[in-house]
Image: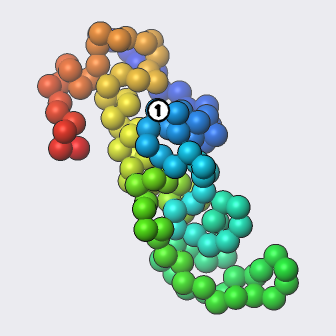
Amino acid sequence: MIQMEVFLGGFFVVGICFVEQTGFNSSTPLKVCCGFGGEYNYNPYVTCGNSGIVPLPSGGSQFVNINTAPNPQEYIQWDGVHFTQAAYKTIATFLLEGRFVTPAAPIFSLAQACNLNFSQF
């Protein structure tokens, strides 16, 4: 029996690994796909898919509709709390292929052991 331990050191480390090894947007690894405002496109006052009044940094407020970016497959963060579907797919694929798994086992992978085909995943 092979024991595997999954360790995630933090969103920053995960973001760096994704950007280096996948097709995620390298210019905005921490930017939110479905949000509003600021450097990270995140605002805690109005969540993804909703409308509401958002305070502005310069003072005052603005009514906004929070919609998804046109290219969500390029983002790691969905709404500042959850990963995107593309990020979850990458995590699952990496784990099933044996990447980021301790102990490293380049010969063994769950995908090979279970005859999994990721072409339709």
Q: Residue at x 35, y 11 (%)?
A: 106
Q: Position of residue 17 (x, y in %)?
A: 53, 33
Q: Splitting the image into 4 quarters, where does residue 43 fall?
A: bottom right
Residue furthest right in the image: 59
Question: What colour-coding does the image apply?
Answer: rainbow
Q: What residue is at 20 percent from the left and 20 percent from the top?
A: 112
* Residue 110 in the image: above or below residue 117: above
Give whichever of 88, 71 is nearer the camera. Answer: 71
The local crowd at label 1, few if under 14, some if 14 to 19, many if 20 or more residues have their Cα within 10 Å, is few
Residue at 64%, 89% in the rendered image: 63
Q: Residue 121, position in %: x, y?
A: 23, 44
Secondary structure of residue under mark 1: helix
Image coordinates for residue 91, horizontal then vertical, percent: 41, 38
Name the residue at the front extreme.
27
Q: Is residue 44 in view from this perspective?
A: no
Q: Amino acid at mark 1?
A: Gln
Give the vertical position of 38 relative to 55 (above or below): above
59 in relation to 30, above or below = below
Number of marks: 1
x, y percentage for residue 33? 52, 62
Residue 72 can be seen, yes or no: yes
Locate the N terminus by quadrant. top left
Q: Is residue 57 above or below residue 77?
A: below
Residue at image coords 21%, 36%: 118
In this rendered view, identify the residue nearer to me: 119 or 23.
23
The residue where tag 1 is placed is 21
